[in-house]
Amino acid sequence: MKLTELITNTALLGTAKKQLDITLLPDELRPLLSEIAEKENNAEAAFFKQTAFIHAFLQAGMLPETRVEVEVPEAPKEEHSYLSEEVTDLVVELAENGRDKFLMYCYRRLANQSSILRPYALPILLQRAYVGQGKGEERLLLDIIGGRRGRWLKSFMQLSDNRQDDDLSWDTATHAVRVAMLSDMRRKRPADAIALLQEGLSAEPANRRADFICALEIGLTIDDEPFLLATLQSDKSKVVKEHIVRLLQRLPDSQFVRMCERLLAGKLHYNRIFGWRYDEIEYTSELKQWGFQQISDVKGESDNEYLLRQLAERVPLRFWAEFYGTDEQMAACRLADNPPFKKNLFALSETIARFRHADWAYETIRTKSRYATEELIALLSVDQREEVRIPDNMARHYVPDCWLDEQVVWGKQFSKWMVERSRNWYYVSEEVVLKLHPSVLDLLENQNRDDKWDALVYLRKKIDRTIDHLTEQ
Amino acid sequence: MNFHLTKEQITQLAPDDASVKAAKGLTNLKKWPLLQFSDRAVWGHCQGSGSKPYQMAVDMKDMTARCSCPSRKFPCKHSLGLLFLLEMEAQAFSPAEEPDWVAEWLAKREAKAEVKAKKAEAPVDEAAKEKRVEQRHSKVLDGIDELQTTFHDLLRNGLFNLPNQGFGVFERLAKRLVDAQAGGLAAQVQTLLATDYEDDEWKSRVMMQLSRIYLMAESYKHLEQLPPEWQTTLRTAVGFTQAKEEVLATEGFRDEWWCVWQSRSLVNKLNMEVSWLYGLTHDRFATIVQFFPHSSTPEWTVVTGAIYAATLHFYPAVSPMRAIPEQLERVETPLIFNAISSVDDLLRRYRTQMGIDPLLDAYPALVEQVQLCRSGKSYFLKDKDGNLLKVSLTDNVLHRVLAVTGGDRFTAFLLGSPFGWTINAFVYESKHYIVGNETN
């Protein structure tokens, strides 16, 4: 038995119940400890003195361990050179200060070149990347720029990518987590998401079925139509059906949209002199089944026009190109210039947004800027946004979330426009500063903004300067 | 300009992380309409939201800063920002004659230092002093009586009740010892408050600490019978302080001292900073222990990784370690040091020292050419002969060492005690890394 165990066993039970058995101690200690026991009247005092001597004895006899089997962990050799300390320190600074967006921006840029981060930064960056959900991209990029040392270190830090775990835990996850898992699956393996729902959707309550159907909006393609149609037939929930119809309306080649085109064809007529003219259309059970309304509640609009309007708001640009007998670009301009139906009734912006047709949005806004909505602006490419005139009532107090979705830097003109509007914004964020064209950063710096703006602009410039310098070498 | 602080060293001067973040946000030259330096100081103007910029200056002798902003933090974000800027953009600073507000501040500091020195030389009422010492000694003995009674009760009833009762018992005892002016013993008892009763090792650790404290207390009761160096050591352990002047009057020890590691903790609402120094020529360790209020800086600015030419005066003790510097001058000496080359040699030295001083709290050592290795959940340092030394590692320390060394050999700065060995800093490929920084 070890000496320390002798002491602790006695101490745990208490000297009232147990005494230290000196006979179990090494020969060198026994005379001294016996003497203490004899001279000391108080049993506890004697015990403390004895243990103090035993501990001193042990410390004065400490030897190296030799009989332990050990393994020496060794990291694999790196195949890439290291980035400078300046770049690595910058990344650590962003991570330590919680600059999430700036950090991801840095990671993306660094992943495009061949050097890797210096190893001293790895523990903090790995710890950050593997805490919390939704860090798939961060982990992936860190795997690249952390080099072999980073991947090796992960095993010691007991960090793992939970992608496989997510698949396995569908059955036990909460509804909110399952929706997130389904959304993630739609981004990476859209067909698998459909397969998953085909198996188990009908067993879910209506509100959950509706949430799962909404998740299919991510990566929606015509390949999803068979499942959506089948569910539309079989599902009893009105809400679920509405969501399905809403999704089918987004697909230009879906049966639904083709039906709208077929029914609308030949019912609208336009003449430069007489304007728009509408033929009669019957409100059929087919239309009712698809959710079309029969009666208009707008004063001055007939039920017939209302029905035609609903159909017109569900046909893609190719219909109008055929209607006008011209190409899609010209058709978009003509439609924006002189749309059918009563003034302001025809929801052209919503129609374009539904089909997510960027060029249609561009031509429409160029023709008439009043059609510009936050959603349509978000559809435009960087170059398209440079050319349109955006109404002054937009982005007055905040940046719409849909303008921050893609990982692109805005063009020069659009960035300048945003900077002008930013004076009244409620808040400024890293995402916005990252989207600004580099040429406007100096403009911002020279304005008398608050510390938060200054700090963000300064950081953005520092990151660009540091990484651009790297690229130049 | 003689300025060589690194970013990490400047960060260490900051009172908290928020100050560091705010300071870094100020490192934009456009905010600084004025940046100048002299032989003694560096100063600048920083434009805030008001019409007048803030004025701040740093005394290069000891990195003490002053600023006209209303912040109660010390040093404030502006002063830290000035230092960060100096580190990053030194060329933006121009040499200049000290403006009045800088010169006056520096003059005041010098005058204060002179007054302090004169005060130390003032004659002391010896009789009153002796009476105070006797009174305190009597109070301490009362405190020790209570300590021993408490310990006896604990032991008689058995320690298995400690997980439920221990915190309350030790907290009350520590307070009582503070009242008895035995602050050193109180601090030792307070370490028991942090016992992790979930860890199986708690029984042996607690018992070891109880017996050490008991030994200290019991030895103090027989102070007069002990040799002078033991009397000094025990008085210090119990909580008596030695007058700085007396320590400074002892023989000084000159060397170039490398600050290997530094710890900061909060003790009775004061910051306690312990800087571990290693003499590069004489291979000797020393500690500079400083206490200062939360929002101020210590008397000596000691930065980890820096090397100082200094004469140190050691507090008399059985194992002299704590020292007071006569002066501290930062020097740019290449880091070349001798380290212990084997675990065997390390433990031989440790055994010798523990035999001399069984109350030693921490034994410092630099050991070279060691590798980190593991057996199950335990970690060891393995030297080139294959001898092993078990080390206690937190996950943070383990990951940092492995990240940097990749399993390769390195030089470790260790602190050993009856409770085990810890790695607090290491050197790898000539770079010095801090891992065991404890800010409590």
Image (cartoon, rainbow, N blue to C red):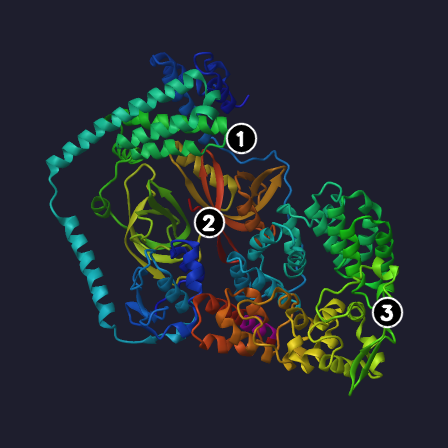
Neighbours of disc 1 within 10 Å: few (<14), some (14-19), many (20+): few
Q: CA distance from mark 3 to mark 1?
A: 80 Å
Residue B339 numbered mark, or none: 2
Other-residue count near label 3 (Cα within 10 Å), few / some / many at <14 / 14–19 / ≥20: some
Three-letter code, disc 2: Ala
**Residue B404 visible to an observer of this rendering:** yes
Amino acid type, callout 1? Glu
Quadrant of res A72: top right
Q: Quadrant of residue A317?
A: bottom right
Q: Label 2 vs label 1: CA separation? A: 37 Å
Q: Secondary structure at mark 3?
A: loop
Query: In the depicted view, which residue is nearer to us: A266 or A463?
Result: A266
Q: Say which amino acid is labelled 3.
A: Ile
Give the chain letter at badge 2.
B
Query: What's the mark number on residue B198?
Result: 1
Callout 2: helix, strand or loop? loop
Instruction: Report the mark closest to the observer, 2 or 1.
Output: 1
Same-subunit check for callouts 2 and 1: yes
| Marks 3 and 1 on same chain | no
Q: Which residue is mark 3?
A: A281
Instruction: Name the spot of residue B245 as percent of width and height, x first.
Output: 20, 46
Label 2, residues with CA under 10 Å away: few <14, some 14-19, many ≥20: some
Q: Label 1's element? A: loop
Q: Which residues are magenta?
A: A464-471
